[in-house]
Amino acid sequence: MKELAGKQDAAGLRVGLVVSRYNEFVTSRLLAGAVEVLTKAGAGEEGIEVAWVPGAFEIPLVARRLARSGRFDAVICLGAVIRGETPHFEYISREASRGIAQASLDSDLPVIFGVLTTDTVEQAMERAGAPERNRGAEAAHTAIEMASLLRKLPETRGKLTGSKRTSDKATRVKLTRTKRASNKPTGRGTGL
């Protein structure tokens, strides 16, 4: 049986980080944890790029743009959504997680979820503290492993150029037109 697994070797990796400014007292610690893991694993500072966004809701759009740019091997998304007294927490958390997952699928690139969703500030600070509990550090480990694993996997359905999927659009259009043409009535029907 053949098994494939990623490694914790970030040498030569290009990683984009999307970080929310909202709750920056937490997200800056997540960022520090992620950068520490990346550099200790061999990533050079020139291969790490950080994009700051206003809040967690804005993370998916920028993550998708970075992932589709062809400049990165992985994108790490860092934010902190802390429950308040309104349902706003649920809306932001749900859309951030959905959007980050969709960015990964759309780009065929690891786009890693490192957004804290906690009930209290204390819980957020716990998950942004010591390296063994820092969610930013954990997200960086995941990004390194996934980028390494994807390098070993065969590409599927269409050509991949860097991180961008490019398919033969002309062939798809031609096939679609051929199918439509074959479904057109010929005028020799049953008269219905």
Image (cartoon, rainbow, N blue to C red):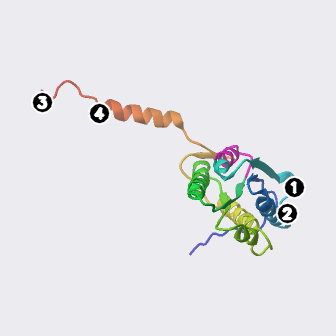
Comes first in the chain, label 2 or label 3? 2
Which residue is drawn at the image coordinates 73% and 67% (left, top)? Answer: 141
Picture coordinates of residue 52, whole percent (x, y)? 77, 48
Q: Indicate whether 187 appears above or below 131.
A: above
- Left or right? Give the position of 76 relative to 49: left
Residue corresponding to mark 4:
183
In the image, the segment drawn in magenta is 61-72
Give SS at disc 4.
Answer: loop
Residue corresponding to mark 1:
45
Comes first in the chain, label 3 or label 1? 1
Q: Measure the C-alpha gap from mark 4 to mark 3.
A: 16 Å
What amino acid is at disc 1?
A: Glu
Q: Measure the C-alpha gap from mark 4 to mark 1.
A: 57 Å
What amino acid is at disc 3?
A: Thr
What amino acid is at disc 2?
A: Thr
Label pair 2/1, CB-CB below 8 angstroms: yes
Image quarter of the N terminus? bottom right
Residue corresponding to mark 3:
190
Residue corresponding to mark 2:
39
Which residue is drawn at the image coordinates 83% and 62% (left, top)? Answer: 32
Comes first in the chain, label 2 or label 4? 2
Comes first in the chain, label 2 or label 1? 2
Q: Residues within 10 Å of mark 3 (few under 14, many from 20)?
A: few
Q: Measure the C-alpha gap from mark 2 to mark 4.
A: 58 Å
Comes first in the chain, label 4 or label 3? 4
